[in-house]
């Protein structure tokens, strides 16, 4: 266990601390403590699965872990160790990410989610996948308060969710404020969020002040689904927050990031980790002492809660046959853990290009999906890679358009300005090689783009395959606008991959690199740390 990762320090917080309590109160001279547990981006990973953990020396350990039964056991253990003085927080992206979740429109998650004993949560960027009405229905049935200060009804301007929650635990008065991704209408297919408006994350500023001044919160915690870099920027811009609980980018933050006395942490994904934040207040008016630990839910450490395991089994039973149907095999491990490129997405984009015969294929840099070990590939694996299936769309783009697109995407992923960050990882490609540098100025990062082994020519047109996102204009492919000769095909992304797996069984990869950053290591696991 990393002893350096379990820190206990005094945090200097701007504006921290409420008015001192009366000295005749029995708690006025006693230290008070409570624990906040935090998970995010579970992506409907209800069961244990292959997982990759990392040691401080960079060594990778592949094992099994995760799942709601282990998450429940870990939360129960922590609650017991602190006399029940604990809260459990969910950072969103809860109901999307697997085949059974998609087929049931999120229903398979509900029973296990309620059994975890979550105390407060927020919506993630994928909660809109089945439309605003279904999002409200699911989040209204979880059995705990859901916060989001920046989601409003577009017609009325009324908020969909409360912005804040105050809870007293172990004698500590917590104030929570929730905020989700303001870029949902652009990151997800626009049709998903029709009728909703997403405001800038800084709208939480007056709520933070109110939690301190009106509600007497001693510890103010922002629950965010913005991505780690933007959560850090929020901490820099909005004073008075003690801790920012960050979600969306699946970053595994073992040591808290500090900005101006505010801690920012993120707890990984796929129910494979549980963050633990211990809070102690020695006496009124004294700033809280904080300690953070990121708990890895490995199979050799947690057996799993049997009650939650049964709830999961019952929920998934109707979907076992479909999810377990073998559609191909892989001779190599397939992972989705990489900012630049991944082995899983090499298979997906090769499948898209082969299905249509274009020179290039592109797919979004999705983060969801645990590793797949060598052996059978199932229908469930396919839906885990691609929980939403859309028709394929082909068209013609110029070399200049490709260059502009890549400059834009590199800025979205590697910008030093958090306001320019958008989504998470780079697009995935087949038939093209991209080389760039992150340390160059915006618009000057691309070193080279090759198609078919030849440098692109700005005026030449190249055929491209991508997906047709619901709500996008007909001439838009993978966020490339003004595509010529666009055609939407009957074959969808899923069927393209199935056909590819049948034709290439077992799948093998040549190991060549399609995307290279000259100033970064070959494998970039973390968007924030870039290593």
Image (cartoon, grey):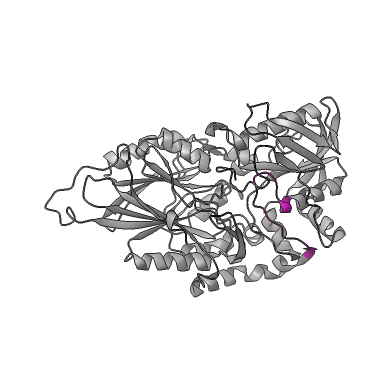
Q: What range is drawn magenta here?
A: 327-345
Indicate left or right for 277 with 524 as reference.
Answer: left
Magenta segment: does it hold 329? yes
**Residue 168 point in image, percent of width and height:** 29, 54
**Residue 508 point in image, percent of width and height:** 81, 58
Is residue 74 positioned above or below 523 on the image?
below
Task: Identify the residue at image location x=67%, y=57%.
Answer: 384
Task: Identify the residue at image location x=84%, y=24%.
Answer: 459
Is residue 486 positioned above or below 129 on the image?
above
Indicate left or right for 107 with 218 as reference.
Answer: right
Q: Is residue 486 visible?
A: no
Task: Identify the residue at image location x=62%, y=40%.
Answer: 187
Is residue 309 positioned above or below 174 on the image?
below
Q: Which residue ends up furthest to the front in the rendered image?
A: 57
Magenta segment: does it hold 399? no
From the image, give the main secondary structure of the stretch colored magenta.
loop
Indicate left or right for 276 with 331 as reference.
Answer: left
Give the image quarter of residue 208.
top left
> Closest to the observer: 3 or 251?
3
Indicate left or right for 39 with 290 as reference.
Answer: right
- For the C terminus, give its image quadrant: top right
Q: Is residue 123 visible?
A: yes
> Closest to the observer: 311 or 465?
465
Give the image quarter of residue 528.
top right
> Closest to the observer: 19 or 81?
81
> Closest to the observer: 313 or 38?
38
């Amino acid at each position: 266990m990393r002893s350096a990762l379990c820190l206990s320090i005094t945090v200097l917080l701007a504006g921290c601390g409420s008015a001192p309590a009366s000295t005749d109160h029995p708690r006025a001279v006693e230290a008070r403590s409570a624990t906040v547990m935090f998970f995010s981006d579970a992506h409907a990973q209800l069961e244990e699965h292959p997982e990759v953990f990392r040691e401080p020396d960079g060594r990778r350990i592949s094992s099994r872990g995760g799942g709601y039964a282990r998450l429940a056991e870990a939360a129960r253990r922590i609650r017991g160790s602190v006399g029940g003085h604990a809260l459990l927080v969910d950072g969103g992206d809860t109901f999307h990410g697997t085949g059974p979740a998609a087929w049931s429109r999120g229903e398979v998650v509900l029973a296990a989610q309620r059994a975890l004993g979550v105390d407060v949560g927020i919506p993630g960027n994928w909660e809109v996948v089945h439309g605003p009405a279904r999002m409200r229905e699911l989040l209204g049935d979880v059995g705990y308060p859901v916060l989001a200060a920046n989601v409003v009804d577009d017609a009325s301007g009324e908020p969909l969710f409360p912005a804040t929650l105050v809870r007293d635990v172990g004698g500590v008065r917590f104030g929570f404020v929730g905020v989700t991704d303001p870029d949902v209408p652009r990151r997800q297919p626009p049709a998903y969020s029709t009728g909703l408006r997403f405001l800038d994350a800084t709208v939480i500023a007056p709520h933070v002040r109110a939690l301190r001044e009106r509600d007497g919160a001693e510890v103010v915690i922002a629950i965010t689904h913005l991505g780690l870099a933007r959560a850090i920027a929020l901490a820099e811009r909005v004073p008075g927050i003690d801790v920012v609980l960050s979600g969306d980018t699946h970053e595994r933050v073992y040591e808290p990031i500090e900005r101006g006395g505010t801690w920012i942490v993120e707890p990984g994904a796929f129910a494979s980790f549980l963050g633990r934040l211990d809070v102690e207040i020695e006496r009124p008016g004294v700033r809280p002492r904080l300690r953070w630990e990121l708990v890895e839910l490995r199979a050799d450490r947690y057996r799993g809660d049997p009650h939650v395991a049964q709830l999961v089994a019952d929920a998934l039973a109707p979907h076992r046959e479909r999810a377990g149907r073998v559609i191909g095999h892989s001779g190599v491990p397939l992972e989705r853990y990489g900012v630049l490129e991944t082995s899983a997405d090499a298979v997906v984009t090769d499948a898209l290009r082969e299905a249509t015969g274009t020179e290039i294929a592109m797919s979004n840099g999705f983060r969801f999906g645990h590793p797949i070990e060598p052996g059978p590939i199932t229908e469930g694996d396919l839906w885990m890679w691609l929980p939403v299936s859309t028709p394929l769309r082909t068209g013609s783009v110029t070399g200049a358009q490709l260059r502009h697109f890549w400059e834009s995407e590199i800025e979205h992923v590697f910008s030093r300005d958090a306001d320019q960050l958008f989504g998470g990882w780079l697009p995935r490609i087949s038939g093209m090689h991209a080389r760039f540098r992150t340390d160059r100025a915006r618009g000057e990062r691309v070193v080279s783009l090759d198609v078919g082994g030849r440098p692109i020519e700005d005026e030449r047109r190249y055929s491209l395959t991508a997906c047709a996102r619901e709500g996008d204009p007909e001439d838009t492919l993978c966020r490339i606008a003004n595509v010529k000769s666009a055609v939407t095909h009957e074959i969808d992304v899923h069927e393209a991959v199935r056909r590819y797996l049948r034709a290439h069984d077992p799948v093998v990869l040549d190991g060549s690199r399609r995307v290279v950053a000259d100033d970064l290591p070959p494998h970039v696991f973390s968007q924030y740390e870039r290593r």
